[in-house]
Amino acid sequence: MTNTSSTSQAQNLQYRTRSCSICGAPADQNWMPAKVNFEELDAFAFASRKLPEYMHFELALCTHCDFVFAKHVPVDDWFEQSYTNADFDASDESQYAARTYGKELEKRLTRIRQQQRALDIGAGDGAFVQQLVVLGFQEVRGVEPSKEPVQRAPEAVRHLLINDFFRAEAFEENSFDVITCFQTLEHVDQPNQLFSDVHRLLRSGGAFMTVAHNFRAPLARMMGDKSPIYDVEHLQLFSPQSLRKIYQQHGYAEIEVSSIANRYPMSYWLKLFPLPAGAKRRLLEQMKGTRIGNLMLAARVGNMLGFGIKA
């Protein structure tokens, strides 16, 4: 179903020009021309782990930071409404991702001074909030702007979710031991501001852990604009160089940037293949509930983990 609100807004959209969110410089190299058809954007266009539409705004490259960003984008209200009203149908997949990220955080707990309070930014249906509770954090909160995933969150964690955009002023400074942000850095307008805000909210010895797409990954480079990382939701894309740089720029210590393997069923991996939409939907329907569709596969497809400590 077409998102009629997006279609009507598109007719009168105002655009703004963005610069590199790390160094502030204007674009110095074109990366990809815009490819957007607003009439084809539905309620899942701003949902996590959706079927890719292979659409994106005009993309530029900051060669100084090795950072790709959307150069001309609609004004903020369009994004806020799109995220607020986004649909959600990925509860199983969010659980798979949360388990992977939970294991990665568990490996690094000895590097964190205290393990009392944790915050997950871009929490979806609270899948990773559950992992933080399991890992032993005593006070856990999650922030998620979309209404639908919060409403579908398990009762055990729904009360821990704040249905809003992340606002640093809503939290006390120097109050968290861990803040996480998974597959969300691409979506925020000002990642520089996010890293700064998180640094203020962390206690000394606390950690900021992120997972982001790597546009320099071999698979992303091979697929080009058919890679699902190029998406209308994504305002920027990092490389290992630019992710490390933004951690350094905000004073984080013990910085780690590394490749991460995700573990999903075959049916999810099929979602990401650049097949015609109709054929893909038919295949997914045929695979539903089958042994091969449920077969779990771990793969390094281009996601990277970032980790830094507030000194």
Image (cartoon, grey):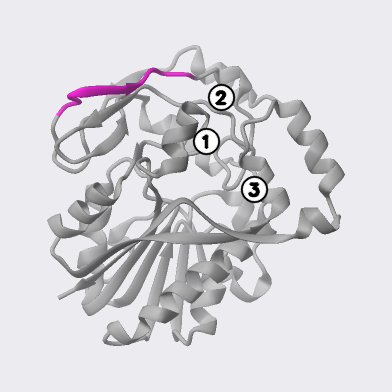
Q: Which residue is drawn at 60% across and 26% down?
A: 41
Residue count near mark 1 (Cα–Cα under 10 Å), binned few <14, some 14–19, many ≥20? many
Instruction: Give amino acid for label 1.
Output: Ser
Q: Which residue is drawn at 86% across and 43% down?
A: 286
Instruction: Specify the segment rendered in magenta.
Output: 26-35
Q: Is the magenta stretch mostly helix, strand or loop?
A: loop
Residue count near mark 2 (Cα–Cα under 10 Å), binned few <14, some 14–19, many ≥20? many
In the picture provided, is 107 more to the left or to the right than 192? right
Q: Nearer the viewer, mark 2 or mark 3?
A: 3
| Tag 1 secondary structure | helix
Residue at image mark 2? 6
Instruction: Give amino acid for label 3.
Output: Trp
Residue at image mark 1? 82
Instruction: Give amino acid for label 2.
Output: Ser
Looking at the image, which is closer to me, 126 or 173? 126
Quadrant of image for the C terminus: bottom left
Give x and y (percent) for residue 21. Answer: 22, 40
Q: State which tag comes first along the sequence, 3 or 1.
A: 1
Looking at the image, which is closer to me, 259 or 77? 259
Residue at image mark 3? 269
Residue count near mark 3 (Cα–Cα under 10 Å), binned few <14, some 14–19, many ≥20? some
Marks 2/1 in contact by CB < 8 Å: the verdict is yes
In the picture provided, is 285 more to the left or to the right than 99? right
Give x and y (percent) for residue 309. Answer: 23, 73
Q: State which quadrant residue 15 falls in.
A: top left
